Image (tube, rainbow, N blue to C red):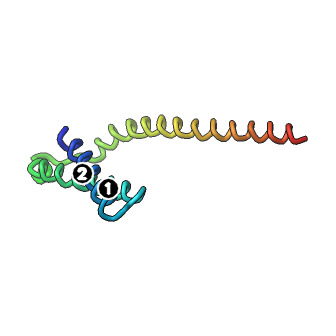
Amino acid sequence: MGWLQISDGVGRFGIMVLVILVFGGKAAAAMFAAVVGQLITISIGAWLTYSIWSVRPASPFNAKRWMGEALPLTLGLGTVLLMSASICFLCRASSRTRARRRFTLERC
């Protein structure tokens, strides 16, 4: 599966060079190249793992049990990410407020 990451990088770079040189693209070309690189990687990954996910399992899948085990882990990690992101926004907002206060005090 490490080759998938390599193909993603090569695909992004190749498409980006192609779009920039041929079409004169800019930032939109980079985003388009990233999407195409991801699509190439997903296609190769699906093709390589087709024999695994195309077979019917011998036992039935217990979705309720799986959700009971996976949901707490997902919510726990999501909470950490949410709090990390909100701290960045709060720090930025408080620094802007302090800068505004200083500006208004200096003007008076």
At x 84%, y 42%, the residue is 104
The residue shown at (37%, 41%) is 71
**Which image quarter is the C terminus in?**
top right
Q: Residues within 10 Å of mark 1 (few under 14, many from 20)?
A: many
Please tell me which residue lies in front, 65 or 74. 74
Is residue 106 found left or right of 90 in the rendered image?
right
90 and 27: which is toward the camera: 27
Please tell me which of labels 2 and 1 falls first in the chain: 2
Give the number of callouts: 2
Q: Residue at x 31, y 59 (%)?
A: 21
Q: Amino acid at mark 1?
A: Ala
The residue sitting at the bottom extreme is 23
**Secondary structure category for the residue under label 1:** helix
Disc 2 from disc 1: Cα separation: 7 Å
The furthest residue to the right: 108
Q: Split into 4 quadrants, where in the image is the N terminus?
A: top left
- Label for residue 104? none
Residue 78 in the figure: left or right of residue 15: right
**Residue at image mark 1:** 33
Helix, strand or loop at disc 2? helix
Check disc 2 and give the amino acid type: Gly
Where's residue 89, x and y in %? 60, 41
**How many neighbours does mark 2 have within 10 angstroms: few (below 14), some (14-19), or many (20 or more)?**
many
Residue 64: x percent and y percent?
30, 46
Q: Residue at x 74, y 38 (%)?
A: 99
User: Mark 2 touching mark 1, by CB under 8 A?
Assistant: yes
Any mark on residue 11, and which? Answer: 2
Residue 60 coordinates in the image, percent (x, y): 17, 48
The quarter of the picture where residue 30 lies is bottom left
